[in-house]
Amino acid sequence: MSLTVNLYYTGKNGAARQFAQEMQDSGVVDRIRAEEGNLKYRYFTPIDDPETILLIDSWTDQAALDRHHASLMMTELAALREKYDLHMQIERYRDDDADNFQDEEFIRD
């Protein structure tokens, strides 16, 4: 069972985008992606809200996410969030039934 967390970082005057860029440029993103259990770590910009960055963060299970939360990188992340004065909104999703995918008729390859 995998776990996906959507994090919406919102700031002012481009701060959220600057945060995501610094995360990428500093190598933190690559280090997170290399952590055992990480499946996805990608930033997106909502087309209707340029002051928000969406992070889609997926892990194999809660234990992998817990290890990530206990890592020293979380200190770096927290410092960058403070630096850019970001506010967060979080959504969590579990993939409990990956074998029961019934939406294939709506997907265009």
Image (cartoon, rainbow, N blue to C red):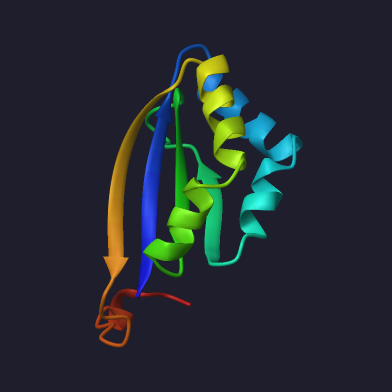
**Looking at the picture, how far across and down is residue 79, in whole percent?**
57, 23
In the drawing, does residue 39 fall left or right of residue 65? Answer: right
**Looking at the picture, how far across and down is residue 81, in whole percent?**
51, 24
**Relative to 100, does residue 90 appear above or below in the rendering?**
above
* Residue at figure coordinates x 37%, y 31% from the top left: 48
Q: Nearer the viewer, residue 87 or 50?
A: 87
In the drawing, does residue 79 fall left or right of residue 91? Answer: right
Q: Nearer the viewer, residue 44 or 9?
A: 9
Quarter-of-image position of residue 90: top left
Q: Nearer the viewer, residue 86 or 13?
A: 86
Q: Is residue 82 visible?
A: yes
Quarter-of-image position of residue 25: top right
* Residue at figure coordinates x 30%, y 75% from the top left: 106
**Relative to 56, does residue 3 appear above or below in the rendering?**
below
Q: Which residue lies most toward the top here?
A: 13
Q: Is residue 14 visible?
A: no
* Residue at figure coordinates x 70%, y 51% from the top left: 30
The quadrant in which the N terminus is found is bottom left
